[in-house]
Amino acid sequence: MAVAFRFTRQLSQTAGSLMASCRRNLGMASVLMAKADKSVDPIQKLFVEKLQEYKKKSAASGDELVDFTPDKKAKMEVEMDQIRKRFGGGNLEEFPKFDFDEASA
């Protein structure tokens, strides 16, 4: 009789802890699934799509700038000519070389 009582008490304790564990696991699973659904932010999705679109355009344009129209190219040339006139010409796309004399320093 005592063995049966201990057995039923042990079984009820095990069942209680098993039920609590199942409730916790199911509760966490629902929270994690909800977070996974919300992680697809529409703004983030749009940003990724634009990055992929830019990557395709960049690969198609080669060494040129992306979406570089002849009108934009003409405007850039006008601006570059003005800068060349102001700063004495030369190649504006290379870093200037500086020569320092040790004696004057």
Image: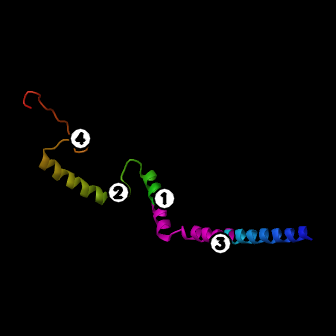
Identify the disc placed on residue 27.
Answer: 3
Which element type, helix, strand or loop, lies under badge 4? loop
Mark 1 lies on residue:
52
* 22 to the left or right of 72: right
Tag 4 or tag 3, which sits nearer the N-term?
A: 3
Judged from this view, the residue extending furthest toward the left is: 104
- Name the element at disc 2: loop
Label 2 is placed on what type of residue? Phe
Q: Cβ–Cβ below 8 Å for labels 4 and 1? A: no
The tag earlier along the polypeptide, 4 or 2, is: 2
Q: What kind of secondary structure does the magenta stretch mostly adopt?
A: helix
- Quadrant position of residue 102: top left
Tell me the amino acid under the disc marked 4.
Answer: Phe
Q: Is residue 43 above or below residue 84?
A: below
Residue 97 at x, y percent in the picture: 19, 36
Q: Are the residues flagged by discs 3 and 4 in contact, CB closer than 8 Å?
A: no
Q: Is residue 17 left or right of residue 82?
A: right
Residue where numbered disc 2 is placed: 68
Magenta segment, which residues?
A: 25-50
In the displayed orientation, state which residue is furthest to the right.
1
Measure the C-alpha gap from mark 1 to mark 3: 37 Å
> For the point 74% across and 69% down, which residue is it?
17
Q: Residue at x 41, y 48 (%)?
A: 62
Residue 33 sits inside the magenta stretch: yes
Q: Which residue is mark 4?
A: 95
Mark 3 or 2: in front is 3
Measured in 3D between alpha carbons, the distance from the residue under mark 3 to the one under mark 4, in whole angstroms, is 61 Å
Q: Earlier in the sequence, mark 2 or mark 1?
A: 1
Name which of mark 3 and mark 2 comes first in the sequence.
3
